[in-house]
């Protein structure tokens, strides 16, 4: 595993100055423990925390900048509308923070030394950005809509539940007739995602159609379906389930990383698509998938 860059602490300190706080929500990275176990870290101008899978936090200084990992944060929809871009990070939520960061930093050639998570309200007009820029680790930007509908769908309507985007591919494959024992990568390792058995029912395998709303906002989509403005989506939900907590995206919560995660059932540390643009250390190339 790669060691921390020799200038790591200097770079982190430079990014966590008070004047950058409106832009820099978090600085995140991973580093090995003495026993070789990789551990995730997050820091803000408020403090620094060590993150382990399962939501285990060890505050190293200041206050925990990731106070919550609740994937159901800012629900119901009215709560999200009341505070659409919570700042500072202590008022936000970052689901599965360690798991997603450890995947992002696991690729030997394509993972960066660290990542800067911009604040929810910030965008970059000088770089042709737009309001609603995405990519963050936070709950709202990471919450993709997830609806399961049709003959093999469990009819649970609007369910107070959540899943992960890496669960979608395995679920579609299982519905199409792939045995769970075959849901493995080419090296024979189990996928990161799992079949969403709570939202499907046993039956004969048949055709499966996946519809991907690229960049769709989970809360907006379900609200418009419930209010009658999206009758087609409402009919899909009547024939199955819509998860109010959606499906948690991999980090960064951007298009090509997550399209690949949906289709493969593994995170970026395994499939290697680290973003819409990333640097490959092995080739020295700037990759634009």
Image (cartoon, grey):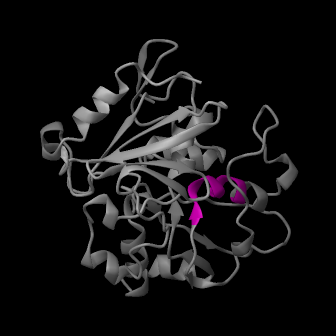
Q: Position of residue 183 (x, y in %)?
A: 79, 48
Name the residue rendered at 56%, 31% in the picture: 272
Horizontal side of 49 relative to 39 (left or right) equals left
Q: Can residue 124 be seen in the rendering of this structure?
A: no
Horizontal side of 237 relative to 81 (left or right) equals right
Relative to 176, is 145 above or below? below
Residue situated in front as seen by the camera: 269 or 144: 269
Residue situated in front as seen by the camera: 220 or 151: 220
**Majority secondary structure of magenta residues:** helix
Residue situated in front as seen by the camera: 231 or 163: 163
Q: Position of residue 284 (x, y in %)?
A: 44, 12
The residue segment tinted magenta is 163-171
Horizontal side of 230 relative to 154 (left or right) equals left
Name the residue rendered at 50%, 25% in the picture: 110
**Quarter holding the C terminus?**
top left
Relative to 193, is 267 above or below? above
Q: Position of residue 130 (x, y in %)?
A: 20, 50
Instruction: Write down the quadrant of residue 54 in the picture.
Output: bottom right
**Quarter holding the N terminus?**
top right
Q: Position of residue 228 (x, y in %)?
A: 39, 87
Name the residue rendered at 49%, 12% in the picture: 283
Q: Can residue 98 be seen in the rendering of this structure?
A: yes
């Amino acid at each position: 595993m790669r060691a921390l860059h020799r200038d790591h602490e200097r770079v982190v300190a430079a990014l966590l100055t008070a004047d950058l706080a409106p832009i820099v929500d978090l600085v995140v990275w991973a580093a090995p423990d003495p026993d070789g176990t990789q551990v995730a870290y997050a820091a803000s101008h408020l403090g620094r925390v060590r993150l382990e899978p399962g939501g285990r936090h060890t505050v190293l200084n200041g206050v925990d900048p990731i106070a919550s990992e609740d994937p159901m944060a800012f629900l119901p929809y009215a709560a999200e509308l009341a505070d659409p871009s919570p700042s500072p990070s202590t008022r936000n939520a970052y689901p599965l923070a360690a798991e997603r960061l450890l995947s992002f930093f696991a690729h030997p050639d394509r993972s960066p030394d660290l990542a800067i998570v911009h604040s929810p309200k910030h965008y970059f007009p000088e770089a042709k950005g737009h309001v609603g820029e995405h990519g963050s680790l936070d709950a709202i930007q990471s919450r993709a809509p997830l609806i399961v509908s049709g003959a093999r769908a469990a009819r649970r309507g609007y369910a107070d539940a959540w899943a992960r985007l890496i669960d979608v591919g395995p679920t579609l494959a299982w519905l199409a007739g792939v045995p769970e024992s075959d849901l493995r990568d080419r090296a024979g390792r189990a996928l990161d995602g799992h079949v969403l058995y709570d939202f499907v029912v046993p039956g004969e395998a048949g055709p499966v159609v996946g519809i991907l709303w690229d960049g769709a906002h989970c809360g907006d989509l379900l609200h418009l379906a419930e209010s009658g403005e999206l009758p087609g989506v409402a009919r899909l939900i009547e024939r199955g389930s819509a998860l109010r907590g959606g499906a948690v995206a991999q980090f960064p919560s951007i298009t090509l990383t997550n399209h690949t995660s949906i289709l493969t059932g593994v995170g970026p540390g395994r499939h290697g698509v680290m973003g819409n643009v990333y640097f490959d250390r092995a080739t020295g190339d700037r990759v634009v998938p």
